[in-house]
Image: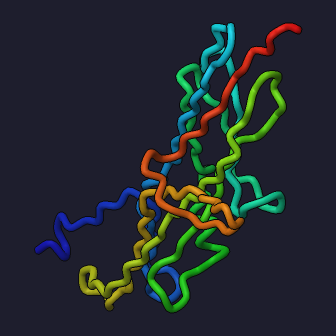
Amino acid sequence: SANSHGGGIANNGVLTIGEGDDTITGNDSYVPEVDLEKKLDSKGDNNVTIADMTFTFVMKDKDGEDGNIIGTVTNDANGNATFNFPEGFFDQYLNDHPFGEGDEQELVFYVTEDNDHQENVTYDGTIYKVVITLTRTVEKVTIGDKDDFTLETVSIGEPKILVKIVHEDGTDEYKEAENGIVFNNTYTTQTPT
């Protein structure tokens, strides 16, 4: 029978069996990446392209100056960049923020462009909000002739990208960013006087 011959458990993440309170815990090994695109509009008498420029982008856990930096990236010659979460980030998050009564948690991050004051550049001040949902599934399972175990799995969802819209009256809201994270800068050559 499968109980004693050839049965097995397949897992791509962390799996702990039989420790403590007969709870099996694990998470999937998927770690989301947050991609962005940088565009440069070159105005005036110049041949500057995105391949000639490097810009820096920051992901924080809060909007504004007091947020903790999760990652910093720069664009490549095509204007692309990807935030990769540090190894063990989600495991550490779950250790610090265990699930309570609910079966979902939302992690919220904010992505901005760092204005490093490059000459002739007008920076894009757009703020993007990245929401990643962690979902917990709990079920009772029996392995072999052992007592029932509680199997807890945490799945990490795809990032949802929102863009901050500021209205004329000064109020703001976040709406879905249909094109993902895209920062548009302008490079303008100053004409000699």
Q: Quadrant of residue 190?
A: top right
Location of residue 90 in the rendering, given as x and y in whole percent from the top left corner: 57, 62
- Image quadrant holding the N terminus, namely bottom left
Location of residue 11 in the rendering, given as x and y in whole percent from the top left corner: 35, 61
Q: How many marks?
A: 0
- Residue 32 falls left or right of residue 172: left
Above or below, 155 against 58 in this view is below
Q: Quadrant of residue 91?
A: bottom right
Seen from the viewer's position, the closer of residues 49 and 111 is: 49
Q: Quadrant of residue 149?
A: bottom left
Identify the residue at horizontal 68%, vertical 20% (top origin). 53
Identify the residue at horizontal 52%, vertical 76% (top origin). 105
- Residue 65 falls left or right of residue 140: right
Above or below, 186 against 113 in this view is above
Identify the residue at horizontal 29%, vertical 84% (top origin). 141
- Image quadrant holding the C terminus, namely top right
